[in-house]
Amino acid sequence: MDSLKGRDLLSLADLSIDELNYVLDLAASLKSGMVKLKRTKVLGLLFSKASTRTRVSFTVAMYKLGGQVVDLNPNVTQVSRGEPLVDTARVLDRYLDILAIRTFEQKDLVTFANYAKIPVINALTDDEHPCQVLADLMTVKECFGRLEGVRLTYLGDGNNMANSLMLGCAMAGMNVRIACPEDFRPNPEIVAKAKAIANGKTEVTVTSDAEAAVKNAQVIYTDVWASMGQEEEAKIRIPLFEPYQVNERLLEFADRNAIVLHCLPAHRDEEITDAVIEGNQSRVWEQAENRMHAQQALLAGILESD
């Protein structure tokens, strides 16, 4: 799909619905071995936040395409000594073919994209985690054979995962419910954007009632209650979030064929019980694997062929 070539991905909403479906279909074909693509380019990883799945999945995805990866740890680059982002962006633009950034503020990502001519991918910010949702949608489609009409409920903090899930589900024609405490609701601007994308054809709901949100849901999704940079708030948050724990009792309200997803890392017996994450309804490990396939498809779509 030529419309993806050379593009940034700062938000999931940067993709059209056709482009989203193209990436998911290509990811499935790459995973099955039906399609093999080659992109002998160089990917830079500039990660200011800790990472396991994102770092490794991007690295392996690029290697599978025949490319190379440069891990730009900010602690051993001039970024850690205060070099302006605009200077770093213009220099990396001359070395790399594509750059994935994992940082705190969305505005820093936008700065890089504005000053670097190469494509910039959001590998996670405090606002969004679009690459994770590509893998999530791929996993749902594998399990149900479709995305349209599937009911997904997210329980927990109205964080970057809640934001991106609302956008992704609305784009895919899924119904999405976000259940969280009143003071931890997702970004209202992104809620409004997701509802505009859904255009009344599918449900985008934010509620504080966990049981009502889970009723008849086909996908149950959760994330940690305190994201990176919020660790000091964990003790305060735990009592507020306990009603949103994904456990066997709560799953009784869901569809009997429901699956359970978690973007990981998980705090077992906190936001999700050990029994559930290891249970028959869990698709967490397939979901984690699909990060690699979805990102390989995204990289192939953005980069020019050899």
Image: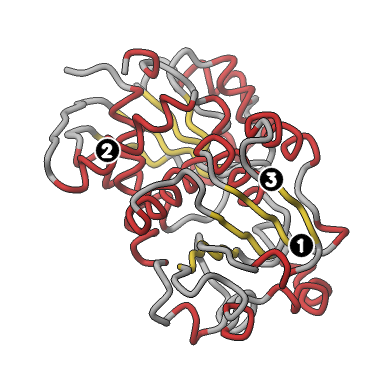
Q: Mark 2: which amino acid?
A: Met
Q: Mark 3: which amino acid?
A: Val
Relative image position of residue 274 (x, y in whole percent)? 51, 85
Type of colouring: secondary structure
Relative image position of residue 272 (x, y in whole percent)? 58, 77
Between 275 and 145, the one nearer to me in the picture = 145
Name the image quarter holding the N terminus.
top left
Relative to residue 153, is residue 270 depicted above or below?
below
Relative image position of residue 58 (x, y in whole percent)? 35, 44
Q: Are there few (<14), some (14-19), or many (20+) residues within 10 Å of tag 3?
A: many
Seen at 77% across and 43% down, the residue is 187
Q: Nearer the viewer, mark 1 or mark 3?
A: 3
The label shown at residue 12 is: none
Q: Which residue is mark 2?
A: 62
Mark toward the start of the polypeptide (3 vs 2) = 2
The label shown at residue 180 is: 1
